[in-house]
Image (spheres, rainbow, N blue to C red):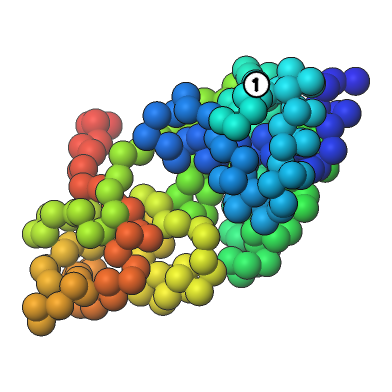
C-alpha cells in the first residue's frame, strides 16, 4: 500500500491547496501562510496549524511556525496527482456528460480522491490525452509535467492582432457563465478593436460578430497571440 492510499481526502485537499497557492506566488519557494490556507479552504486557522504539523510529521511538507509551509517532493507529487485527477474528471464531466460549470467542479472535487490509477489511465486515453481542462488549466502528466502556455489577461492584450483564449479563471461560476455567453471559452479566436465608447469595456471582433466585453471580465479571460502553423507538404 502506497502512502497516498493511507491519506484522507482532507490531507489531499491541503496538499492541493498548498501547491495551488504556491503556484500563484511571484516567488514559488515562499511558504504558504496559515491565513492564506484558512481563507482558501474556508477553515479555522487553528485547524490549518494542526494539519500543517501533521503534514510535516508525514514528510509531505516543511512547516515553520508563524511562517507557513512548503511541500516536500513527496507532497508535491501527491498534489499533482490529485490535480491531474480533478482536471481529467472535469474534462470528462463537461465534454462527455454535459455537466454545467458548478456541478462539474463539485463532482470532480468528490471523485478526485477515489479513482484508481487504472481508471485515471483509461479516462486519459478515452479523452484523447488532453493537455488542458475546460478552464484551460494544464493537466499534469503522470510524471507531474504540465504544458504551460504563456497568456495575459484581456486588459493587457494588444489591439489589432489575432488572439486565442487560453484560460479562464474558475473562482466564480457566474463570471464563467458570462464569459461563456460571450463565446470566450478556451480555444475561441478574436481581435480586440479597442475601448468601447471611451469606457474601460473592450470591443472585440470574432469571426461572425462584434461584442462588448465588460471591464469586470477582463482579468478573468487570458489570451495570447494566435500563431499560424504551416502544415508540411504531403
Give the quarter of the figure containing the N terminus: top right
Seen at 31% across and 39% down, the residue is: 150
Q: Where is residue 220 in the image (x, y as percent from the top left)?
A: 38, 60
Q: Where is residue 100 in the image (x, y as percent from the top left)?
A: 61, 69
Residue 65 occupies which quadrant of the picture?
top right
Give the quarter of the figure containing the C terminus: top left
Residue 103 occupies which quadrant of the picture?
bottom right
Residue at mark 1: 62
Seen from the viewer's position, the closer of residues 194 and 18 is 18
Q: In this view, does 70 lie to the left or right of 194?
A: right
Q: Dot 1: few (<14), some (14–19), or many (≥20) neighbours within 10 Å?
A: some
Q: Where is residue 175 in the image (x, y as percent from the top left)?
A: 45, 71
Q: Residue furthest front?
A: 66
Seen from the viewer's position, the closer of residues 144 and 78 is 78
Q: Is residue 68 above or below residue 133?
A: above
Q: Is residue 186 left or right of residue 64?
A: left
Seen from the viewer's position, the closer of residues 36 and 186 is 36
Q: What element carries label 1?
A: strand
Say if residue 15 shows up in the picture. yes
Q: Position of residue 219 (x, y in %)?
A: 33, 60
Seen at 40% across and 29% down, the residue is: 27
Amino acid at each position: 500500500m502506497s502512502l497516498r492510499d493511507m491519506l484522507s481526502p482532507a490531507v489531499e485537499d491541503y496538499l492541493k491547496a498548498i501547491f495551488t497557492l504556491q503556484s500563484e506566488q511571484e516567488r514559488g519557494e515562499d511558504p504558504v501562510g496559515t491565513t492564506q490556507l484558512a481563507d482558501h479552504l474556508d477553515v479555522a486557522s487553528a485547524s490549518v496549524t494542526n494539519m500543517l504539523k501533521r503534514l510535516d510529521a508525514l514528510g509531505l511538507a516543511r512547516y515553520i511556525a508563524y511562517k507557513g509551509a512548503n511541500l516536500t517532493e513527496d507532497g508535491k507529487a501527491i498534489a499533482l496527482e490529485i490535480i491531474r485527477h480533478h482536471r481529467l474528471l472535469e474534462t470528462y464531466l463537461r465534454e462527455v456528460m454535459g455537466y454545467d460549470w458548478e456541478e462539474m467542479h463539485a463532482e470532480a472535487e468528490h471523485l478526485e480522491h477515489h479513482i484508481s490509477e487504472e481508471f485515471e489511465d483509461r479516462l486519459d486515453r478515452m479523452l484523447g490525452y488532453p493537455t488542458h481542462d475546460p478552464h484551460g488549466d494544464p493537466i499534469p502528466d503522470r510524471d507531474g509535467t504540465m504544458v504551460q502556455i504563456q497568456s495575459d489577461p484581456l486588459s493587457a492584450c494588444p489591439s489589432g492582432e489575432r488572439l486565442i483564449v487560453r484560460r479562464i479563471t474558475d473562482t466564480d461560476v457566474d463570471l464563467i457563465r458570462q464569459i461563456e455567453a460571450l463565446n470566450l471559452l478556451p480555444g475561441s479566436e478574436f481581435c480586440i478593436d479597442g475601448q468601447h465608447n471611451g469606457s474601460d469595456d473592450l470591443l472585440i471582433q470574432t469571426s461572425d460578430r462584434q461584442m462588448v466585453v465588460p471591464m469586470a471580465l477582463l482579468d478573468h479571460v487570458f489570451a495570447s497571440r494566435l500563431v499560424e502553423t504551416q502544415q508540411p507538404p504531403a
